[in-house]
Image (spheres, grey):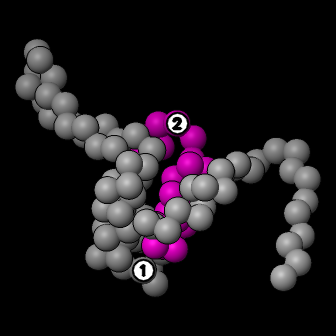
Amino acid sequence: MRIHHTCHADNFTVLANGTIRDRRLSFTARGILAHLLSLPDGAREDVRTLADRNPGVGRRGVSKAVQGLEDAGYYIRRTIRGPETGRVWTETFV
């Protein structure tokens, strides 16, 4: 197999080969990870929006892939409660 690489001046994402080849992850999880890493900081994505953008996978498939990312340490969720308001929200780190 011959791989054709091109130079990119802007609008691209760089991923480590070790991440792309991580056999703990399904191909769906790897694709979701690449998509998430291509987004700007502060982007709002969750299982519902990811599934809506990828109808062939479905919510269950996306949820399973995200769980795989979480199990492998690529996706971290923290639930936070505001001390003054008591409001609860989830922060996600990729």
Instruction: Read off the magenta span.
Output: 26-44
Task: Tell me which residue sits at (29%, 76%) in the image.
Answer: 60
Image disc number at residue 41: 2
Q: Is 77 displayed left or right of 11 in the figure?
A: left
Residue type at mark 1: give it.
Answer: Val
Front-lying residue, 23 or 41: 23
Quarter holding residue 5: bottom right
Q: Is 18 displayed left or right of 75 in the figure?
A: right
Q: Residues within 10 Å of mark 2 (few under 14, many from 20)?
A: few
With respect to residue 31, does 60 lie above or below? Answer: below
With respect to residue 32, does 86 lie above or below? Answer: above
Task: Tell me which residue sits at (31%, 37%) in the image.
Answer: 91
- Percent position (x, y) of residue 32? 49, 63
Task: Tell me which residue sits at (51%, 53%) in the image.
Answer: 36
Image disc number at residue 57: 1
- Percent position (x, y) of residue 13? 69, 49
Front-lying residue, 91 or 14: 14
- Percent position (x, y) of residue 2? 88, 78
Secondary structure character of the magenta stretch overall: helix
Whether residue 81 can be seen here: yes
Sooner in the amino-acid sequence: mark 1 or mark 2 = 2
Q: CA distance from mark 1 to mark 2?
A: 25 Å
Image disc number at residue 87: none
Viewport quadrant of the N terminus: bottom right
Residue 35 among those drawn in magenta: yes
- Percent position (x, y) of residue 55? 44, 80
